[in-house]
Amino acid sequence: MRETLRQLFRDVRSQKLRTSLTIFGIVWGTVAISLMLAFGTGLHKQLIKSTAGLGDRIVIFDRNPGRIRAVVRAARPPPRSSRGSGDPSP
């Protein structure tokens, strides 16, 4: 076991450029993957935030023979007014 470790350190010292390039490649790849994951997560959150209001009120026109009707669907209830407590009493 000791002889193997001595040989390992001898090879590392004799191959300095190869060792440093290998370490650099491992570090560079780890940083690149971390940055790509962070960028993808940030982009996903921004897309969710920017498309949050789309489709809140959808109008569907249904044309059957003899009648036309419009259906309005709200994806979520409209926001309440911040004035007052919502109590209709004067």
Image (spheres, rainbow, N blue to C red):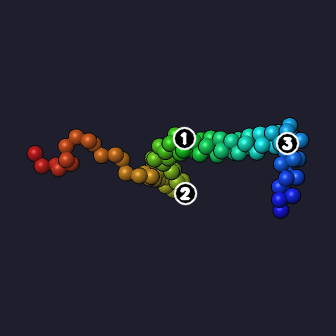
- Distance (Cα) linking label 3 and label 1: 48 Å
Query: Is residue 83 found left or right of 24 in the rendered image?
Result: left
Relative placement, left or right, of 85 versus 2 is left
- Could you tell me how many numbered marks the image carries? 3
Q: Position of residue 29 (x, y in %)?
A: 74, 43
Going 61% across and 43% down the picture, which residue do you hit? 38
Indicate which disc residue 8 carries.
none
Q: Is mark 2 on a helix, strand or loop?
A: loop
Residue type pointed to by label 3: Arg
* Residue 51 appears in the figure: no
Judged by depth in the image, the label closer to the viewer, 3 or 1, is 3
The reply to whether dot 1 and dot 2 touch (C-beta < 8 Å) is: no
Residue type at mark 1 is Gln
C-alpha gap between disc 1 and disc 2: 44 Å
- Image quadrant occupied by the C terminus: top left
Instruction: Report helix, strand or loop for mark 1.
Output: helix
Quarter occupied by the N terminus:
bottom right
- Residue at (47%, 43%) from the top-left corner? 53
The mark nearer the N terminus, 3 or 1, is 3
Question: Of all residues shown, which one is farthest toward the bottom?
Answer: 1
Task: Characterize the local packing of mark 1: few (<14), some (14-19) or many (20 or more) Cα atoms within 10 angstroms.
Answer: few
Report the residue marked by disc 2. Answer: 65
Residue 58 visible in the current orientation: yes
Residue 19 vs residue 26, the one in the foreground:
19
Residue 48 location (% of width, % of height): 53, 45
Q: Mark 3 points at which residue?
A: 13
Q: Which residue is drawn at 52% across and 54% down?
A: 62
- Residue 47: % across, % down: 56, 42
* Extreme residue in the left direction: 90
Nearest the camera: 38 or 8?
Answer: 8
Where does label 1 land, which residue? 46
